[in-house]
Amino acid sequence: MSNPIKILLAEDEPSLGQIIKESLETRNFKVDLCINGQLALDQYHRNLPDILVLDVMMPLKDGFTVAKEIRKIDAQIPIIFLTAKSQVKDVVHGFNIGGNDYLKKPFSMEELIVRIQALLTRKPSIEKTLQLGEYQFDNTKQTLTYNHISQELTHRESDLLYHLYQSKNKVLERGYILNKLWGNDDFFNARSMDVFISKLRKKLQKDEKIKILNIRGVGYKLII
């Protein structure tokens, strides 16, 4: 039997935290519940979880601060933010500092579980290393290499770039990729995807021939 997936859950509301913890444990996840950001950061270093579920508003250190500190040493671990905030600037900020997903309260446990599974499940590709102009994209290791210098991609960045590559020089429909990678095509997920597109453009900017075009009202096109 394989080891259970380890989830680090940081939630300062005791009743909600316990409900989430117990619900996840019934699905065979191993959950460490922390009631503030500092405890979450300490627990991360002690236990090295597989995924982080962080409430944004917490005492001592908020979820964004915890994520920023972890991203300095770990570019790969998936991070989901839980928050009652719904302003676009907060959503964008969460993704800019390295978040992979964003769930607004109140939410259903089934939705949280689907989001967790989506971030943890990666379909293997027959093509391991793909050539993107002067870049080499390793879809398995989630790296992008230019002139022998590699940079790491997050799960979401790697998934999005892979789908753009699969549809290279053709339009990747916005609704299709939002439903496939984000679970639905609502406004906040659309803004989230825009953030990730911007991140990919910056990481590919050393090869001027590579473009990710925004086809207004339709989707994106990767030009190689």
Image (tube, helix red, strand yellow):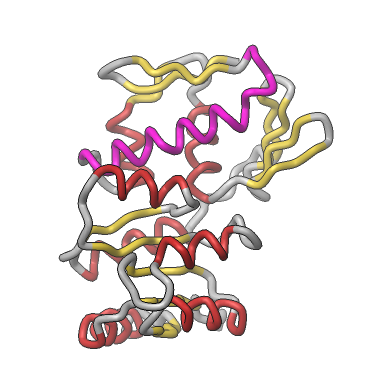
Displayed quadrant of residue 195: top left
Which residues are drawn in magenta?
Answer: 187-209
Quarter of the figure that contains the C terminus = top right
Displayed quadrant of residue 188: top left
Q: Is residue 15 above or below residue 69?
A: below
Displayed quadrant of residue 81: bottom left
Q: Is residue 182 highlighted in magenta?
A: no
**Position of residue 216 in the picture relative to residue 127 (left or right):** left
Residue at 52% across, 42% down: 157
- Residue 60 image offset from top left, x and y in percent: 41, 77
**Position of residue 128 in the picture relative to residue 217 (left or right):** right
**Position of residue 68 in the picture relative to residue 142 (left or right):** left
Q: Main secondary structure of the magenta part?
A: helix
- Residue 119 image offset from top left, x and y in percent: 44, 57
Residue at 40% across, 84% down: 34
- Considering every residue shown, the one lying at the far right of the view is 148
In-front residue for pair 221/128? 221
Q: Is residue 80 above or below residue 161?
A: below
How many numbered circles are shown?
A: 0
